[in-house]
Image: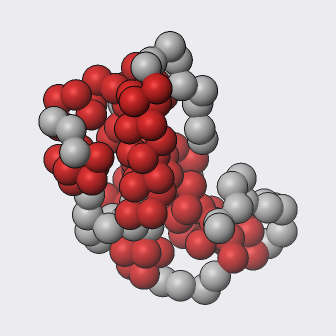
Amino acid sequence: AEAPVVAESGGAQEMYRHMLAYIAENFHRPIDRNGVARAVSITPQYATRLFARSHGMGMNAYLRSLRVQYAERLLHDTAHSLEAVARRSGYAGAAYFIREFRRVYGVTPGRYRSAVRRGLVAEASVPVD
């Protein structure tokens, strides 16, 4: 989720907000710090430092968090296959997605969906816009 911007100049705050917006609009695509930096017209190194300083976590960690939360919502609300959920959430394929989901939620996506269907999970943790 969104962390407050720490003491940065107005221009840096604006760049940070643009980075957040770019990531939110493109997390389901293959993006990296170079693409984010290009979108804001700054160097990748500066983008990395600015994001970490402003957000309190690294850009890659934030991107992974958005992807896995979106995937959780898709598992909760759709009947898409695991491969489709993975791809719609920005993962290249199901294998990495399954590992990442298990790391975050402590259960595989298939078991999570099964728990949802049995009524053991009432609502996904984050809404999908």
Count of all numbered marks drawn on residues in the image: 0
The residue furthest top is: 7
Spot occupied by residue 123 in the image (x, y as percentages of width and height): 79, 61
Residue 38 vertical placement versus 45 (above, below) = below
Spot occupied by residue 87 in the image (x, y as percentages of width and height): 37, 74
For the rendered model, the colour scheme is secondary structure
Seen at 22% across and 45% down, the residue is 41
Whether residue 75 can be seen here: yes
Spot occupied by residue 105 in the image (x, y as percentages of width and height): 57, 47
Q: Quadrant of residue 9?
A: top left
Seen at 39% across and 30% down, the residue is 11
Q: Quadrant of the C terminus?
A: bottom right
Residue 117 vertical placement versus 22 (above, below) = below
Seen at 71% across and 53% down, the residue is 125
Spot occupied by residue 33 in the image (x, y as percentages of width and height): 23, 44
Q: Is residue 63 left or right of residue 73?
A: left
Seen at 75% across and 75% down, the residue is 117
Q: Quadrant of the N terminus?
A: top right
The residue furthest front is: 10
* Between 73 and 60, the one nearer to me in the picture: 60
* Between 92 and 101, the one nearer to me in the picture: 92
Whether residue 102 can be seen here: no
Q: Is residue 50 left or right of residue 103?
A: left
* Between 82 and 51, the one nearer to me in the picture: 51
